[in-house]
Image: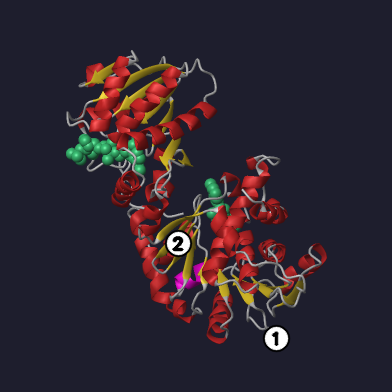
Amino acid sequence: MKILTSEQIRKVDAETITREGISSLELMKRAATAFYRFFTEKYTDRNTSVIIFAGVGNNGGDALVVARLLYKAGYSVKAYMVEFSNRYTEDCAHNIRRVKAENIPYKKILNKEDIPDLSPFDVVIDGIFGTGLSREVSGIAADVITRINESGKEVVSIDVPSGLFPDRKTEFAVKATETVTFQIPKLALYLPENAGFTGNVRIVNIGLNQEAIAEAETDIYLTEKREICNLLKPLSKFAHKGTQGHALIIGGSLGKCGSVSLASKAALKTGCGLVTAYLPKCGVPAIQSGFPEAMALEDEGEEHIRSIDYDLKPDAIGIGMGMGLHEETAQAMCQFLQQKRTPLAVDADGLNILSRHPDWLGLLPAGTILTPHPKELQRMIGEWCDDYEKIEKTKALANRYGVILVVKGAYSMIIDGEKIYVNSSGTPALATAGSGDVLTGMITGLLAQGYKPSEAARIGVFLHGMTADIAGECIHPRSFVASDIIENIGNAYRSLEKKN
Ligand SMILES: NC(=O)C1=CN([C@@H]2O[C@H](COP(=O)(O)OP(=O)(O)OC[C@H]3O[C@@H](n4cnc5c(N)ncnc54)[C@H](OP(=O)(O)O)[C@@H]3O)[C@@H](O)[C@H]2O)[C@@H](O)CC1
Ligand SMILES: Nc1ncnc2c1ncn2[C@@H]1O[C@H](COP(=O)(O)OP(=O)(O)O)[C@@H](O)[C@H]1O
Ligand SMILES: [K+]
């Protein structure tokens, strides 16, 4: 699904009106109805008292239509117009007249004294600013937003939390519990620095013109189930372990060999035919007894890897988990990179070694997948002042070395050249020890099956997230562990194959 800028969204909005021969008021009604459906499913009790803040633009117009719909449905509704300007849009002005005609409680807020006490209300609906935000919020709008944020109430934002810039750094905005955004995802909704503003993000369809969306050019996408389904290769009736790819997982050091076991199991569960774990001697007995499906190779090092030496032809390699930073291990990795051109995924200490020796980045085979969490990323690209700069610096690294970066987080981002794929699956249950090792194993397993690096990264990250979405129904997120991710990979595949 495309992520577009506010400028592009405005164009799609206008094109929808022209091409579908509908009025802008009709489109506003569709948007408000989609919001209303979400709201009434969440707040089923019609005695819920709702305070609605509207602005003078079309986001405010949406808010007033929502006020009318909720009032008609029996909710207790009070609407307030935050008059930060007297230049109302036509559709907003039209809906003010309708609200008044329908006798819905309605007042203007012109200065601080007009701001009502929020304590009697159950929920706040925020429709002050949408995608038309053009500058930092100040004056009465800022006062209202501050009051909303201080109220401790649940806040449902229309389209975007008011004050959030869809495409650039935001300092101040409504802190929503839920954001109901209209059909086209906006990048700002998925950035970690905006987590405090956006709350849960829900995308609702409002029937925007599909051709207009298709014509909009972008390099940024939100990865969804449908796109991942389309990437999956069918499983041939005549498949055998030799056709499904051989993954080699290299890592481990004394006390950290479980990471290799997790990654190896994850690779196999993701569908590759064979997996070999390569570890220092201390790790081999445990993996051989605990994970009989894997083959194991021991390094000459007792407690850490000293020279990566094997006589196999794997189809893909995952390296780095639990490997430690011993200088002998680093040198072994350097030699390995100088000699091997096998499709590769690098994680954890593999990345930390590269951060200590940045000139070795040039040795990575083209298309290598690097999977840093934020701390590992910071060691690679240095500090960033905001998430937009982080993206630019990551892109620069990816382009310089021809590699793919998986920037892990709540919405992991896959950066491949100019393209950015924001992942939409997963829950905080994934924030658990070994979760990243499992992800690297999954990605390596997919690479071994012959998926292109960008596909392997997107499928792996999406499937990994799906395991938590699915298992959330029977395992409490707090007690979900890395092995539960592995156990649910099959369920994630099954869910992907289900039509809906
Ligand atoms: N996408 C879609 O397809 C659909 C979109 N729809 C809805 O339309 C919304 C976009 O509406 P919109 O363009 O009218 O802009 P909106 O955000 O209401 O505010 C603009 C007003 O705020 C003002 N203003 C801006 N910044 C300011 C500041 N810091 N401080 C003070 N003033 C400031 C600005 O003034 P100006 O910048 O012109 O001086 C102007 O007066 C969108 O989010 C969605 O809810 C649906 O109805 C239908 C389908
Ligand atoms: N709140 C969250 N929502 C969704 N996914 C998350 C969340 N927190 C972490 N994850 C995912 O869990 C994984 C954690 O990886 P990492 O930090 O490397 O773990 P570890 O080092 O313990 O193996 C990443 O894939 C990340 O995207
Ligand atoms: K809003």
Element assignment for label 2: helix
Residue 2 drawn at (x, y percent): 42, 55
Coloring scheme of the render? Answer: secondary structure
**Main SS of residues in magenta:** helix
Residue 105 vs residue 489, the one in the foreground: 105
Residue 348 drawn at (x, y percent): 55, 64
Tell which circle, 2 or 1, labels the residue nearer the N-terminal end: 1
**Tag of residue 377:** 2
Are there few (<14), some (14-19), or many (20+) residues within 10 Å of tag 2?
many
Q: Amino acid at mark 1?
A: Asp
Q: Could you tell me which residue is drawn at 68 percent across and 77 percent down?
A: 301
**Residue holding disc 1:** 311
Q: Could you tell me which residue is drawn at 43 percent across and 31 percent down?
A: 33
Q: Amino acid at mark 2?
A: Leu
Q: CA distance from mark 2 to mark 1?
A: 32 Å
Please give left or right for residue 69 compared with residue 371 in the image: left
Residue 449 drawn at (x, y percent): 65, 72
Boundaries of the magenta span:
351-356
How many numbered markers are drawn? Answer: 2
